[in-house]
Amino acid sequence: MKIYHTETQADYNALMIELERQGHVWVNGSEPTRWIDKIWKIYKGSTCVDVESNKQMQHCGIDYYEREYPDTPIIKYKAKQEGHTMTPDQERGYSEANNVTKPSHYQDKNGKDLYQKWYEEHDIQTFRAIMRAVAERYTSRYEKKNGIEDLKKGIYTLERLREYEEREAE
């Protein structure tokens, strides 16, 4: 068994993306990135994840692991390892494997996605209207068309809108 400790949400998200890439699952069979926000909110900076040799994972606070497994080293996991820098999407928990929101044909030759281009090309009121319309489109049709994939797109769009709103507020 390996026990990983994460001190920040970005560290935790990076660990979940890496463990998912390696084929690990929670004991209930779900993907590591499925519960990113919920599990982090429980333990925050004391969040630990133990990974068994059968690729199943569990979580608890660091106090539990220090008490129950005093002879097992706890690995402090950091988001930036071996020169790897996380993208903002990875920090939010979106891995390349579940990339439903940023297909390559939505990017220009400079790597800007549609949202960034809209933000640069339109005034803030128009940009807000576009983003709300896109989010509404995905969230209103998810039950009838593409299911959870569309719901993720709608949520992602609203998260991006929040980021631009925070940028405007500065």
Image: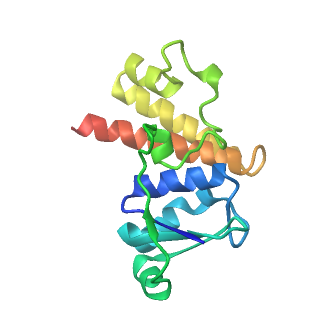
Residue lying at the far left of the rendered structure: 170
Left or right, 108 with reference to 57:
left
**Please, is residue 160 above or below residue 48 in the view?**
above
Q: Is residue 58 above or below residue 123?
A: below
38 and 51: which is toward the camera: 51
For image coordinates 62% across by 59% down, the residue present is 32
How many numbered markers are drawn? 0
Q: Residue furthest top?
A: 109
Residue furthest front in the image: 71
Query: Picture coordinates of residue 17 (x, y %)?
Result: 57, 50
Colouring used for the render: rainbow
Quadrant location of the C terminus in the rendered image: top left
Q: Position of residue 153 (x, y in %)?
A: 61, 42
Indicate the position of residue 44 as horizontal and vertical percent values.
Answer: 39, 68
Instruction: Please tell me which residue is depicted at 41% across the width and 45% down the height of the picture.
Output: 80
Nearest the viewer among 141 and 55 is 55
* Horizontal relation, residue 123 to residue 92: left or right: left
Q: Nearer the viewer, residue 99 or 118?
A: 99
Q: Position of residue 63 (x, y in %)?
A: 40, 82
Camera-side residue: 80 or 130? Answer: 80
Q: Residue at x 64, y 53 (%)?
A: 20
Quadrant of image for the N terminus: bottom right
